[in-house]
C-alpha cells in the first residue's frame, strides 16, 4: 500500500517536472523566434511565460522551506 502511494507521488512529480520543462521550452521558443523575427507579439508572451515560471518556482521553494 505504501509503495503504491510512493509510486503515485513519484509519477505526479515526474509529470509536473515535465510540464515545467515543456513550458520553459515553449517560452524560450516564443522568445527566441520573436527576437529573430523582431515580432513583439512573440517576445512578450515568451517573457511572460518565463517570468511566471521563475516566480512559481521561487514561491514553491519558499513554501517547501516553511513546511520543513
Image (spheres, rainbow, N blue to C red):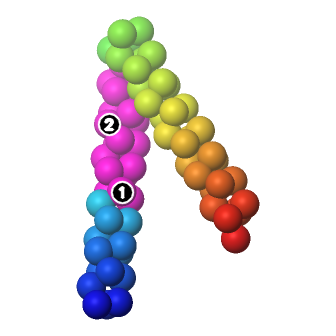
Q: Main secondary structure of the magenta part?
A: helix
Q: Which disc, if any, is residue 46?
A: none
> What residue is disc 1 on?
16
In this rendering, the answer to whether 6 lies above or below 36 is: below
Mark 2 lies on a secondary structure that is helix
Q: Earlier in the sequence, mark 1 or mark 2?
A: 1
Q: Where, quadrant-wise, is the N terminus in this rendering?
A: bottom left
Q: Residue at x 32, y 80 (%)?
A: 5
Which residues, given as a range, are shown in magenta?
16-36
The answer to whether residue 22 is left or right of residue 31 is: left
Q: Residue at x 35, y 17 (%)?
A: 42
Question: Seen from this angle, which residue lies furthest front?
Answer: 1
Q: Residue at x 40, y 20 (%)?
A: 45
Position in image of residue 24 (x %, y %): 40, 43
Q: Where, quadrant-wise, is the C terminus in this rendering?
A: bottom right
> What residue is disc 2 on?
26
Position in image of residue 14 (x %, y %): 33, 66
Question: Who is closer to the viewer here, 29 or 55?
Answer: 55
| Residue 54 among those drawn in magenta | no
| Residue 35 among those drawn in magenta | yes
Question: Who is closer to the viewer here, 25 or 59?
Answer: 59
Q: Which of the 4 quarters of the picture holds residue 2?
A: bottom left
Q: Mark yes or no: residue 35 visible.
A: no
Do the numbered discs 1 and 2 sit on residues whose CB atoms are within 8 Å? Answer: no
Q: Residue at x 32, y 65 (%)?
A: 12
Q: Mark yes or no: residue 41 visible.
A: yes
Graded by Cα atoms within 10 Å as few (under 14), some (14 to 19) or many (20 or more), the crowding at tag 2 reads some
Position in image of residue 19 (x %, y %): 32, 50
Mark 1 lies on a secondary structure that is helix
How many numbered callouts? 2
Amino acid at each position: 500500500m505504501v509503495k503504491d502511494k510512493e509510486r503515485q507521488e513519484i509519477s505526479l512529480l515526474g509529470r509536473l517536472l515535465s510540464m515545467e520543462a515543456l513550458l520553459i521550452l515553449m517560452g524560450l521558443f516564443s522568445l527566441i523566434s520573436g527576437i529573430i523575427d523582431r515580432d513583439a507579439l512573440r517576445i512578450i508572451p515568451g517573457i511572460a511565460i518565463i517570468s511566471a515560471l521563475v516566480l512559481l518556482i521561487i514561491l514553491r521553494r519558499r513554501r517547501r522551506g516553511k513546511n520543513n
